[in-house]
Structures are given as structure tokens and as C-alpha cells.
Image (cartoon, rainbow, N blue to C red):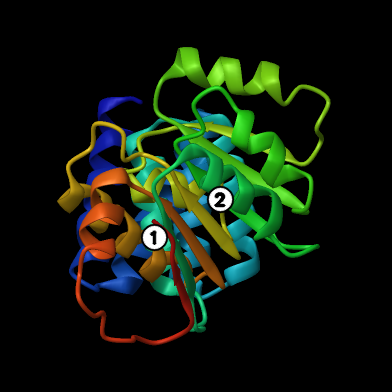
């Protein structure tokens, strides 16, 4: 990006953050006229669509941005912007908390409903991904290790309904840019992750996607909940399985 275009981009983003929408849109229009970089033009068009309130164009442009700039910080920022502009519709979330890999994989096979879009956080080698894909229309499998993500691709080779995303589950914007919808979310990041972080991730994604169901595997969290004398019911059905 040239210095002049970088300045235009910075000014446009600053104006948008200050809610000076006409100014931001005018700066983006100038940038589009001058931009020779297709990636920058894609980003600018997506932001214009967001400013105009054009959801279809914004989502389409975001998908192109994610494909072109899969790990860019601007992609992550745009993903969160689109999510905030058009938040998911609230719905009751059925929750399942398990500890063992056996119980988790059983839910991977049985919990998705036909036609649903699934989001898996912590795909690892893709073994659970294959199970989720047998009942789901589409699976977004997120794995932060590029090497492990490649293993997931190998394990799910031939499955047209699996999309592998190389991203950290904590980077919500980047995941949202690649995965626009999730009806059911599988979280298996609890091996060495502190319980507090597992809880944060589960809450973040429940709020971001408003899924029908959330399946969470965490040995220590499951042990803690299972040892409680009583658990106060919350919104929606739940399954707490030791």
C-alpha cells in the first residue's frame, strides 16, 4: 500500500470509528478510485457496504476478503464490524459439557441436526470433524496450528462440506470472517487451557453466533460442575455429563 493510500485508509477508518459516516464513505470512495491493489479495493468495498447498511453486499465482500487475506488483521476487524452491524438472532442454546473424548465424539455424531452449519473450535487432526460432517450441511473447522490444520485437511479429504480455518479461537473477528453462521458449536480446547479461558471462549462464541447448541469438552470444568451439590437452571435445556 502506498503512503497516500495508507493515509486515506487510516483517515477513513478513524472517521468511521468517530461515526462520521459521510466523511468515512467519501474517503473510501477516493481510495477506491486510486487503489491498484485488489485486496485493498475489496476491503474498501466491504466497508462501504457496511456504511450503506447493505448486508448482502457486505457479507459477500467479507467472504472475498477472507479468501484473499485469510489471516490479515484488517480481515479480523471487518469480521467483527459485520457481526456487530448484523448480530445473530437470539435463540435458546442447548448446552452439553463433557470430559471424555468418547462422550465428546458421541455428541459430534449425534448432536448436529440435518441441514445445520457447525463450527468446531480445536479441530486438531480432524477426527471429530469427520463425525460432525456426517450430519451437518457445512462444518467450519478451526485450528490454530497450521501443521495440525493440514492434518485436518488430510483427514477430511473428499468431504465437500468441510472448511478448514487456520486461526486462534480467541481471534473472534477472524473466525467470524470465515464462518458467517453457526447453528451448533463444538469446543475442544480444554486440554491445557485454563478453565477461565475455556469459559470465556464458550461465552464469546455463544454471544457472537447465538447457536442452537453448544458442546463443550473440558475435564476440569466438568469435574467442578459434577461435584456441585446443585446447579441453578439457566435459559435453555442443558446436559451436564461427567
- Picture disc at residue 119: 2
Q: Is residue 143 rendered to the left or right of residue 181?
A: left
Q: Position of residue 122 (x, y in %)?
A: 44, 36
Q: Secondary structure at mark 1?
A: helix
* Residue 231 position by quadrant: bottom left
| Number of numbered discs on residues | 2
C-beta proximity under 8 Å, tags 2 and 1: yes
Q: Position of residue 230 (x, y in %)?
A: 23, 80
Seen at 23% across and 37% down, the residue is: 193
The foreground one among 117 and 221 is: 221
The foreground one among 27 and 148 is: 148
Q: Is residue 231 positioned above or below 225 on the image? A: below
Seen at 70% across and 56% down, the residue is: 110
Q: Is residue 223 rendered to the left or right of residue 57?
A: left
Q: Is residue 232 positioned above or below 63 on the image? A: below
Kindly identify which residue carries mark 1. 205
Q: Position of residue 92 (x, y in %)?
A: 49, 83
**How many neighbours does mark 1 have within 10 angstroms: few (below 14), some (14-19), or many (20 or more)?**
many
Q: Position of residue 25 (x, y in %)?
A: 39, 64
Amino acid at each position: 500500500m502506498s503512503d497516500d493510500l495508507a493515509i486515506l485508509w487510516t483517515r477513513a477508518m478513524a472517521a468511521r470509528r468517530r461515526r462520521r459516516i459521510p466523511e468515512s464513505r467519501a474517503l473510501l470512495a477516493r481510495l477506491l478510485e486510486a487503489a491498484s491493489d485488489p485486496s485493498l479495493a475489496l476491503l474498501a468495498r466491504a466497508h462501504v457496504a457496511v456504511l450503506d447498511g447493505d448486508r448482502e453486499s457486505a457479507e459477500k465482500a467479507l467472504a472475498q476478503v477472507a479468501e484473499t487475506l485469510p489471516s490479515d488483521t484488517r480481515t479480523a476487524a471487518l469480521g467483527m464490524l459485520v457481526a456487530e452491524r448484523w448480530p445473530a438472532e437470539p435463540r435458546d442454546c442447548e448446552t452439553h459439557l463433557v470430559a471424555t473424548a468418547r462422550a465428546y465424539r458421541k455428541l459430534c455424531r449425534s448432536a448436529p441436526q440435518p441441514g445445520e452449519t457447525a463450527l468446531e473450535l480445536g479441530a486438531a487432526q480432524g477426527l471429530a470433524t469427520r463425525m460432525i460432517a456426517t450430519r451437518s450441511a457445512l462444518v467450519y473447522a478451526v485450528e490454530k496450528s497450521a501443521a495440525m490444520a493440514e492434518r485436518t485437511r488430510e483427514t477430511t479429504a473428499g468431504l465437500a462440506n468441510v472448511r478448514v480455518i487456520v486461526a486462534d479461537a480467541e481471534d473472534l473477528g477472524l473466525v467470524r470472517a470465515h464462518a458467517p453462521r453457526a447453528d451448533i458449536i463444538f469446543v475442544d480446547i480444554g486440554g491445557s487451557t485454563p478453565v477461565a479461558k475455556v469459559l470465556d471462549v464458550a461465552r464469546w462464541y455463544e454471544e457472537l453466533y447465538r447457536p442452537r447448541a453448544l458442546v463443550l469438552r473440558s475435564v476440569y470444568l466438568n469435574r467442578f460442575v459434577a461435584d456441585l451439590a446443585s446447579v441453578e437452571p439457566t435459559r435453555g435445556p442443558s446436559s451436564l455429563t461427567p
